[in-house]
Image (cartoon, grey):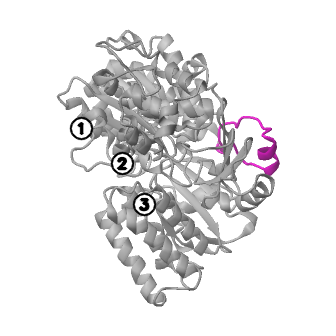
């Protein structure tokens, strides 16, 4: 790190951004102060270290104001929070959306992941290279860079634009002219094609004003909280047990058991976290819920706080979702004004507060323990379990962490009743489920169906394969899932049905590929995604994801090392090591799609 840049200090814009977040340097610290490298008063000692969790928000504040985080700004943040500069630099450079080098006033992130690649992303990149130069070229005005999935797969191709002083904006579907002119309107909430009478989780979206508490309440909003208060903590958790509700993020853990574990923990401080950092390629359901029904998320978090005895919650929102972040912040403000958050929620005598935290472009932070580290101001690296989050979660306190769909499903349990909820779906997979379907289908979007619906029925809802083509394969569960072929279209979309088909539902991503697909480039892009997103903490994942991508590159280029059989064996060995020895689910599933493609003999991979 250039010490001269640190000594130079922040610009006035950067300093103001930090001070707006942390307060003036002279305020809020008891016990004295010290003078920083640039001669300005800074925090010091324990009072600052207790605010280490504000490191990522401070980095965001500077970048939003100035376009990037200079070394001088990083040094100033380090002083204010008493974080060693090397550690602050390690955190800043961990996240793809935090830029610590020179950059243009406007940076355009263009998705080139597997769905956008099939919907014009390559042509878009060529146009931008012609207009703005190669990716990463520094121009005072605009530059661009390729990006992994931006969570806009229902309307690909997609881009994310960041401008100094204006923050982030989404654009999808996108044309090159809109990006070069930067002339476009804010996106509406995503695509839902079903009639409202069929829906339990999505029935308010497009019907209720997402920025109006009155509109939300007129549709039955906050009836769930009132019912919860009447039922009491034990009554609510018993109802969740009876409903059979399991987590919708991929692990499928029973929610009643999780919430009871936090409620029973002997600690005066507990937390609730809404995990809105969905970064799985092909997944966008939580974005639509946060954008279209933000008060439901806040109400469900409040119910979780009541049930577990937590007094504070964090809504962790993916950095690529600026509309979701803004609407959740607004919903929290409105709920607080109405007495639905704060020291005496709804006059029921319990305390609960919520803070929104923005991610910064790290897929690994969707893993719950990595998310804890991110909130705490550390690099988003997973932790060994046990201890489990119900015992030792964020800030080493008992924590209930659920994804957005799971929380909204709790409201459905309260609205429908536990017995009626349990009657939907199958015995082991109860209730309605959201599926994000994209790729080569006629009507990509978010669909709510009962568990037990077949993959074929889901694809029929989406209009089938577009242009009358046949099915090449379907990737179920996103990049961390597995391919199934046309012979498995009648598989039930349940936890047990997907397991029988040697795949998993994951968070509900379904990506369809037609029968003209060459799967070689698809697998290489998936392998590249895992290579780039590995946090690097454990050797099996750090090395294995790189070697997997290299091996696939040789195979798809017809240059196998030692022959096709030897290269295939190398991939199998890598898969076994990553699956068995990686710390977290990223490494454990990084080879799933690749290995399933070989098992099925998909075109382009069985050369």
Residue 158 screen position, x and y as percent: 68, 49
Residue at 48% across / 33% down in the picture?
Answer: 7
> What's the distance in space between the residues labelled 2 and 3, CA to CA?
24 Å
Residue 140 screen position, x and y as percent: 73, 41
Residue 66 screen position, x and y as percent: 62, 32
Q: Which mark's residue is nearer the viewer, 2 or 3?
A: 2
Q: Secondary structure at mark 3?
A: loop
* Residue 430 in view of the camera: yes
Residue position for label 2: 381
Residue at 39% across / 67% down in the picture?
Answer: 543
> What's the distance in space between the residues labelled 1 and 3, CA to CA?
28 Å
Task: Name which quarter of the figure residue 114 lies in.
Answer: bottom right
Q: Is residue 184 left or right of residue 372?
A: right
Between disc 2 and disc 1, whose residue precedes? 2
Is residue 182 located in the magenta-colored stretch of the structure? yes
Q: 96 or 11: which is nearer to us?
A: 11
- Secondary structure predominantly adopted by residues drawn in magenta: loop
Residue position for label 1: 392
Residue position for label 3: 504
Q: 158 or 263: which is nearer to us?
A: 158
Q: Secondary structure at mark 2?
A: loop
Q: Secondary structure at mark 1?
A: loop
Span of residues in magenta: 171-194
Mark 1 crowd level (few <14, some 14–19, many ≥20, 10 Å Cα): some
């Amino acid at each position: 790190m250039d010490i001269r840049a640190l000594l130079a200090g922040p610009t006035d814009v950067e300093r103001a951004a930090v001070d707006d977040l942390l307060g003036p340097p002279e305020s809020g610290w008891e016990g004295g102060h010290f003078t920083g490298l640039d001669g300005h008063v800074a925090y010091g000692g324990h009072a600052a270290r207790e605010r280490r969790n504000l490191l990522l928000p401070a980095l965001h504040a500077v970048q939003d104001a100035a376009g990037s985080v200079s070394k001088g700004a990083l040094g100033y943040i380090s002083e204010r929070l008493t974080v060693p500069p090397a550690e602050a630099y390690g955190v800043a450079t961990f996240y793809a959306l935090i830029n610590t080098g020179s950059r243009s006033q406007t940076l355009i992130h263009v998705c080139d992941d597997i769905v956008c690649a099939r919907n014009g992303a390559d042509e878009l990149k060529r146009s931008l290279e012609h207009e703005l130069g190669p990716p990463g070229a520094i121009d005072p005005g605009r530059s661009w860079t390729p990006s992994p999935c931006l969570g806009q797969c229902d309307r690909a191709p997609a881009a994310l634009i960041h401008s100094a002083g204006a923050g982030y904006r989404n654009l999808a579907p996108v044309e090159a002219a809109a990006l070069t002119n930067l002339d476009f309107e804010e996106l509406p909430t995503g695509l839902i094609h079903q009639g409202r009478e069929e829906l339990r989780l999505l029935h308010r979206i497009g019907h209720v004003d997402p920025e109006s508490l009155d509109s939300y309440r007129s549709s039955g909003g906050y009836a769930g909280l009132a019912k919860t208060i009447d039922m009491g903590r034990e009554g609510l958790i018993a109802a969740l047990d009876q409903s059979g509700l399991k987590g919708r993020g991929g692990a499928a853990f029973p929610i009643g058991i999780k919430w009871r574990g936090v409620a029973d923990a002997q600690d005066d401080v507990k937390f609730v976290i809404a995990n809105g950092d969905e970064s799985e390629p092909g997944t966008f359901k939580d974005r639509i819920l946060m954008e279209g029904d933000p008060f439901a998320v806040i109400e469900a978090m409040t119910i979780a706080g009541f049930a577990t005895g937590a007094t504070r919650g964090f809504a962790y929102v993916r950095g690529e979702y600026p509309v979701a972040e803004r609407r959740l912040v607004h919903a929290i403000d409105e709920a607080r004004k109405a007495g639905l958050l704060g020291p005496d929620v709804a006059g029921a005598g319990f305390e609960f507060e919520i803070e929104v935290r923005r991610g910064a472009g790290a897929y690994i932070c969707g893993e719950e323990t990595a998310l804890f580290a991110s909130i705490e101001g550390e690099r988003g690296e997973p932790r060994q379990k046990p201890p489990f989050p119900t015992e030792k979660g964020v800030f080493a306190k008992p924590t209930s962490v659920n994804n957005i769909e799971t929380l909204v499903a709790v409201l459905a349990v309260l609205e429908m009743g536990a017995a009626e909820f349990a009657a939907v779906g199958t015995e082991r997979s109860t209730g309605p489920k959201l599926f994000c379907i994209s790729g080569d289908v006629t009507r990509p979007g978010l669909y709510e169906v009962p568990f037990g619906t077949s993959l074929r029925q889901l694809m029929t809802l989406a209009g089938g394969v577009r242009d009358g083509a046949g099915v090449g394969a379907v990737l179920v569960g996103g990049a961390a899932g597995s391919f199934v072929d046309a012979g498995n279209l009648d598989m039930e979309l349940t936890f047990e049905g997907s397991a029988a088909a040697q795949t998993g539902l994951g968070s509900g991503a379904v990506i369809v590929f037609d029968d003209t697909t060459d799967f070689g480039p698809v697998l290489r892009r998936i392998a590249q995604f895992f290579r780039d997103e590995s946090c690097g903490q454990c050797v099996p994942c750090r090395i294995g994801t790189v070697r997997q991508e290299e091996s696939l590159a040789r195979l798809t280029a017809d240059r196998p090392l030692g022959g096709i059989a030897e290269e295939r064996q190398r991939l199998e060995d890598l898969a076994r090591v990553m699956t068995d020895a990686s710390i977290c689910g990223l490494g454990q599933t990084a080879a799933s799609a690749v290995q399933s493609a070989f098992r099925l003999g998909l075109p382009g991979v069985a050369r």
